[in-house]
Amino acid sequence: MAQKNREQNSYNKTSIMNTSNSIAAIPDKTLNYCSEASPIGFDANQARTIPDHTASSVSLYNRLLEFERGGTKLEPGLAESWDISKDGKVYTFHLRRGVKFHSTPWFKPTREFNAEDVLFTFERMRNPNMPFRKAYPVEFTDFHHLGLDNLISRIEALDEGHAIRFTLNTVHAPFLVKLAAPVISILSAEYAAKLLKEGNPSDISWKPIGTGPFIFQEYIKDATIRFRGNPEYWKPDEVQLSRLIFDIVPDAAVRAQKLKANECQVVTSLRSTDIPVLKHDPGLRALSQPGFNVRYLIYNTAHKPLDDVRVRRALEMAIDKKALINQVYEGRAQIAVAPLPPLQWSYDKTLQDAPRDLKQAKALLAQAGYPNGFKFSLWIPHSSIGTNVNPRLTAEIIQSDWKEMGVEAKIVGYEWGEFIKRAINGKHDVLLIGIISNIPDPENLLKVFSCTEIGHGFNLSRWCHSSFDDLIQRAAQTLDIAERSQLYTQAQKLLKREQPVTPLAYAINYQVVNKHVTGFKINPLGPTIFSGVGLK
């Protein structure tokens, strides 16, 4: 860990001058974006959070397939087209020609994008023994979560590097949609070889090179990220900014102030209390839409007494979700019951919460051996992140509800990076967190409760049920949507019965932008996208 910190600090203030005259073809516009958190780096394959993906995946890189901007429809990306074998196990992608990697003071590409770059990107994530991975040993948690490490049997370059073939071990219905996930961004094999030769493999994260709409210039730790528009982007109409600046502002109230003062033209993760005021500002424009998000409490089932389902049921039964929606979101959210959001196909709308009943909740605690209640910790992030709106107020409401049945929850707050790090290590009792699915497939949100995810940074509840795992595995290997939905419905019912989590809210996505911002669309899958965005 100390070595990783030294590597990060060495690039915390790397200022790069723009040496390209061709950027004059891009409108001479600068957009300032108020981001809620610092990135862990700019290697999209390692990114874990929405702020990470905004700063790396969707700004610097491309994937074989993409989601349409502002939607969930799959579109060609670095792959122009693809073929699927009759048995559903072999996918051949025909790669786009003429795509150039970023040219910077620290790297000048000598060739265009080809299959070698796809091979490097995937082999680095799936093969711990490949030279670059051994030289820079990092974990690829999202790649594992997507199941691609065990799913892919073989990858081959074809047609003199202009096509790539994936052979899978089994039929996998969500394979295509997973290739559009932010973490499957394609890196430069030529750049990686240069870094390996020079003995600086960690530069792949701190001096990034991609094919995306923006080129990295500078990162000042916990303060500023600077990009310039890519004058050689293969979709030139989508680069409408010569300069894109991320202003890292953890405090949501300060982000709102900066938006009103035109110090930032786009902000993220606003407090619900700020939205009504900002909507009436004539210099601003408020956008909203449902998203692929769920906000919930996660119970660490490895800690007593949370290992007892009766205790978990009692805790949920005591929470007044309606009051929480009204006070925290001011009605701008829907009460969550299922572990999937209503926007997701296979969402089970038949699921219902048990009625709020403190008497019955106390009886369940008594049955579990806790007639006088118990004490434990409730963890929250210090600031609003994504759908985790006003975590302190949310925790205080829940704390008050639990106190009515004799349960004392100590609220513990951490900075976002430390919050996630400690949660992955299983130090928490109960965790308040919001999750946004970055691919529109039900497996992505349900698999976080799989036994296979324990210890890999996703199953923070540490709950394990073989029948649940069997349902989601069978669903992934079923191509018929109706059959998949049926299996996912069964999985949701099982999860609801066992309650390793308490869903709280499905938040409406809000982003408020300066009225002079053009082409901006809310991304229902989380990261803020600046391709196609300009300024009047």
Image: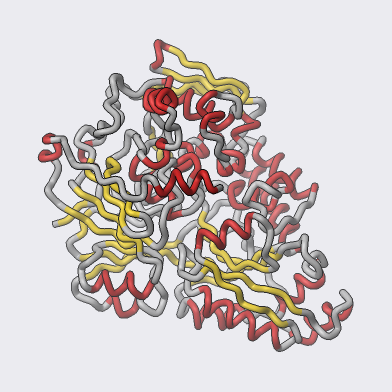
Q: Is residue 515 above or below residue 66?
A: below
Query: Is any atom of residue 46 visible in this view?
Result: yes
Query: Could you say where residue 38 lies in the image, as x and y percent from the top left?
Result: 41, 57
Work out which residue is located at the far top of the displayed protein and give it. Answer: 160
Query: Could you say where residue 288 lies in the image, as x and y percent from the top left?
Result: 37, 65
Identify the colour scheme used. Answer: secondary structure
Quadrant of res 151? top right
Query: Could you say where residue 212 lies in the image, as x and y percent from the top left?
Result: 32, 38
Q: Nearer the viewer, residue 358 or 222?
A: 222
Quadrant of res 30? bottom left
Q: Nearer the viewer, residue 203 or 473?
A: 203
The total number of labels drawn is 0
What residue is shown at x 75% (from left), y 50% (from top)? 468
What residue is shown at x 67% (from left), y 65% (from top)? 428
Query: Is any atom of residue 342 visible in this view?
Result: no
What residue is shown at x 25% (from left), y 64% (from top)? 264
Query: Could you say where residue 407 lies in the image, as x and y percent from the top left?
Result: 74, 82
Q: Is residue 230 above or below residue 48?
A: above
Q: Is residue 87 left or right of residue 451?
A: left
What residue is shown at x 57% (from left), y 58% (from top)? 420
Quadrant of image for the C terminus = bottom left
